[in-house]
Image (spheres, rainbow, N blue to C red):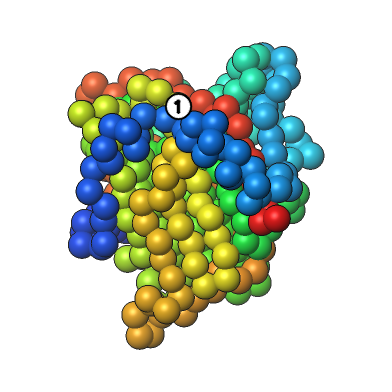
Amino acid sequence: MKPIARRTAAVAAVLAAAALTAPLRPAEAGGPLGPAGREAAAARWKLSWHDEFDGRKGARPSGSRWVHDLGGEPRWGNQEWQYYTDRAKNASLDGRGRLAVTARRERLPGMAGCLYGTCDITSARITTRGRFSQAYGRFEARIKVPAGQGVWPAFWMMGDDADRVGWPHNGEIDVMEVIGRHPGTVFGGMHGPGFPFSGVGGRAVLPGGARFADDFHVFAVEWSPGKVTWLLDGRPYFTARRSGLQAGSRWVFDHPFHLLLNVAVGGTWPGPPGARTRFPATMLVDYVRVYTRR
């Protein structure tokens, strides 16, 4: 994949100025929908792809479903500190039906030439590129994120034609991003021609000072022609529409996208790790599920 500049320092200001939601009320943020809501959802959606991450402890994620992106800056374009590996120490099953994506403070051979940070952070970024992609539907994952200043977990999607047309012309949909200095806020957004670094997006805030690192939450998008809606625990908090794009922007979200999971560290948006940031920093993924509309 070609270099991808997913974020710049301008993102924080743009998201702050975007159409953001108010904090969710406790009844809206306490967990997934109840039985009636789940039944209604099942009537609308049909499962098309999933990974439940069942398997023995220490096994790497399925090679039939996932591939690893490897290396570090300057490839990722965000001045991130981490070096991505395909080792089980950075991405493996926990034996309890979950995937653990772990950023570690350690130095490996070949990391000394990194451009940013302390050259001592490893992590993992896995993608379904070449394994699975889909246009439209519901894309969701149940995730517990790590805590800590400078830690940047994400569940996101990239247009399959990135190698041919380049970013941002392929399109990017960020289902979930949480950064350490805003532990109770999830950011959802998209990037395309005319809005590459600024993006279009919104956020949801947990009530009562709760943090996303405290428990699992379901992060999802529902995507149809000309429209993408972001949801937290089954409840929508932001919608982007083709008709709402500003002049000079182009909607490139009508073709197959693949999935990505990663834990980044540092960079232009979250900033560097703090003195109290603890490593290993692990994102636990209970499942990833993709649906088509019935």
Q: Is residue 248 above or below residue 285?
A: below
The quarter of the displayed image where residue 198 is located: bottom left
Residue toward you, 81 or 133: 133
Q: Residue 108's x, y, as percent?
A: 52, 28
Residue ID at (37%, 56%)? 238
Viewer can see residue 161:
yes
Residue bearing the label numbered 1: 216
- Amino acid type indicated by mark 1: Phe
Secondary structure of the residue carrying numbered label 1: loop
Q: Residue 127's x, y, as percent?
A: 63, 46
Q: Is residue 17 above or below residue 193?
A: above
Q: Is residue 40 left or right of residue 22?
A: right
Q: Residue 14's x, y, as percent?
A: 25, 62
Residue ID at (61%, 32%)? 287
Residue ID at (65%, 62%)? 135
Q: Quadrant of the C terminus?
A: bottom right
Q: Is residue 131 above or below residue 61?
A: below
Residue ID at (50%, 46%)? 220
Looking at the image, the residue that sits furthest to the bottom is 247
